[in-house]
Image: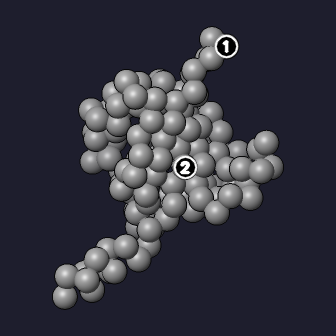
Amino acid sequence: MVADLDRLPCVALAFSDEGRLLSANRRAGEMLGHGPGELAGLGLDAVLPPAVRIYFQTHVRPLLKLDGRVEELYCTLRPRSGPDLPVLANLVRHAGDGATVNMLAALPMHRRAEFEQRLIA
């Protein structure tokens, strides 16, 4: 299964309710400037800019626990170096067998702001 996740053209992260990254696909490591396996064990806060951390704590996590999913979340992820990465993310919560895992899949949206500005102009 992990090998299949590594083939996805998006960032895929699994994290616990406590905010600990459990796993990440290869694309996540590439986009966020981490080597294979380096993201697992970090806090989710390591890849979220400060404003997104607050929004995550106050809105996203409660919705995820209540509804089991959050869709079409436009936010940014924080790479190890360089500018923040704008993404469009969907999250789902899987509970069972005494464990809960939250999954995030995010597509980079590098050109969205530029496209929106052109539409407005």
- Is residue 50 or residue 105 the one in the foreground? 105
Task: Classify 9 as above or below 12.
Answer: below
- Residue 76 falls left or right of residue 1: left
Which amino acid, mark 1?
A: Asp
Mark 1, residue position: 97
The image shows residue 11 at horizontal and vertical percentages of 58, 55
The image shows residue 88 at horizontal and vertical percentages of 43, 57
Q: Give the residue at the far left of this rendering.
A: 121
- Residue 90 falls left or right of residue 52: right
Give the residue displayed 36% in from the left and 55% down from the top.
75
Give the residue displayed 68% in from the left and 58% down from the top.
8
Tally of numbered discs:
2
Give the residue displayed 37% in from the left and 24% down from the top.
66
- Is residue 99 or residue 121 the one in the foreground? 121
Q: Give the residue at the far top of this rendering.
A: 98
Which amino acid, mark 2?
A: Ala
Crowd around label 2: few <14 · some 14–19 · many ≥20 (10 Å)? many
| Marking on residue 105 | 2
**Quick one: SS at disc 2?**
strand
Quadrant of the snapshot with the C terminus: bottom left
**Quick one: SS at disc 1?**
loop
Task: Classify 119 as above or below 96.
Answer: below
Residue 20 visible to the viewer: no
The image shows residue 42 at horizontal and vertical percentages of 55, 37
